[in-house]
Amino acid sequence: MPRRPRPITESWRHALAGRAFVDAFLDCAAAAVALDIVPSPASELVSFSLALEELSGSIDEVRGNLQPQDIDTLQSAVFRLSGDSPPRRTVTLSASPLQHIVTIDVQYPADTAVALDLLATIHAKFPRAEAAPLLDVGMGRDAGNGDAPAAAMRLHPGLQVDHYRLIRRLGAGYSGEVWQAEVISPPPGVAVLAGQVVAMKQYFPFVLSRSSDSLRIQREFRVASELRHENLVSVYDLVLSPSRTFGSFMVMEYVAGESLKSRIPAQGFDWQVCAAIGSQLCAALAELHSYGALHRDIKPANIIVLPGEKLSIKLLDLGIVSLIGEHGLTEASVFLGSKHTSAPEQLFGDEIDERSDIYAVGATLYQCYRGKPLYDEEGPVTAVVRAMLEHPRSCEPKPGASEVEQRFVHFLEACLAHDAAQRPGRARDCLDQLEQLIQARA
């Protein structure tokens, strides 16, 4: 499969200072060299800006020349690894212990998967900073424009954010943390009721670091808010204001139930249960794709099994839905999905389309059927990429499988084709095939 390397650029606020900052920075620089991300011949340069002077050289030189008293005066650090062979390939890591910002810029890596491996290392070494302590006050929709405090504030149960009161934290992902909340009073034009329980996704500040990010999120919100399908979570409200006290957030339907991931037995479900889950999942995707949008992160953890005797599911996390042809919340090369269910082209950083979501459906149903992920390698994205290339997996029917069950397994294999051209072209086609299998069984 052709793979085009893509530049990777990302920045975020970190919480490191002093010796921990220096050690993390030099460790990340050493990781870039060790990964051989820039083909030889390559040159490396580390530059530390101190209060009264600059210290520069190779990683080992800077590590050896840095004195304990220098750490207290450290203002910024830059690492650059560059190769001369065309096209020019560079890795630049910049960080500040004062502003607490770290930025990684990889131009034309020889192997996109290795570049993502480096990004994962830097994420681990430079954890995102938590928000500053909260002021325990309630804010209206226009708050934050006058004398509101400019500092970011930590969320906590009982806090009023705009027209909503937080109940409990549900979790966090790449772009923000999600809270269960109650509607205090319906905002104008928003289809919610007073007392309704909703889910609020509070975006991390880095998601809106550029004006283009806000425009993309607004376009994506317009699509998501128009979607009304029994197997899709509904999206209600969006507030974008990075400078306001409580930042930016999206309000969605709160769905009670268990994640599909927690419900899958060790031996997997019967194929009929998998087909029922798949038909609802494909129906949701057919609706989403009809609006020209992709989900990008279909996995068992993002599917809720609703309470009740009848098997019914909801596909969650429309917060990273992207428009086809748009890059979404971040640059196209920044990996957002789940490495265990993402299509090869998504892991490699290539362009994705509806067939990438279809691969994720196949990987999700494989886990439902076999009781384990298709690729369950631990570690960064590179581990799964290497397994895909060196030991491609296939789905085998269970012992004693009927002819209809074997057809279901054949359907999974088609969805999991490494070449996107060999997969079903539309979610609607997948839905039709699954419904035919369900009817044949009946």
Image (cartoon, helix red, strand yellow):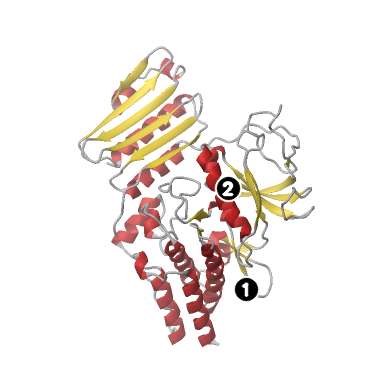
Residue 322 x/y as whole percent: 50, 54
Q: Which residue is label 1 attached to?
A: 311
Q: Nearer the viewer, residue 439 or 59?
A: 439
Q: Secondary structure at mark 2?
A: helix
Cβ atoms under marks 1 and 2 closer than 8 Å = no
Hey, what amino acid is under mark 1?
Leu
Q: Residues within 10 Å of mark 1 (few under 14, many from 20)?
A: few
Q: Secondary structure at mark 1?
A: loop
Quarter of image, res 233? bottom right
- Compared with 218, 66 (above or below) is above
Residue at figure coordinates x 40%, y 25% from the top left: 77
Left or right of 214, for residue 357: left
Q: Nearer the viewer, residue 355 or 195?
A: 355
Q: Which residue is label 2 attached to?
A: 218
Hey, what amino acid is under mark 2?
Gln
Residue 215 x/y as whole percent: 54, 44
Left or right of 62, for residue 335: right
Q: Nearer the viewer, residue 390 or 45?
A: 45
Question: Mark 1 or mark 2, which is nearer to you?
Answer: 2
Residue at figure coordinates x 59%, y 52% from the top left: 221
Distance in Å between CA atoms under marks 1 and 2: 34 Å
Residue at figure coordinates x 59%, y 59% from the top left: 316
Q: Earlier in the sequence, mark 1 or mark 2?
A: 2
| Whether residue 305 can be seen here | yes
Residue 309 x/y as whole percent: 67, 75
Q: Nearer the viewer, residue 141 or 396?
A: 141
Q: Residues within 10 Å of mark 2 (few under 14, many from 20)?
A: some
- Compared with 64, 43 (above or below) is below
Residue 15 x/y as whole percent: 52, 32
Q: How many marks?
A: 2
Left or right of 158, for residue 356: left
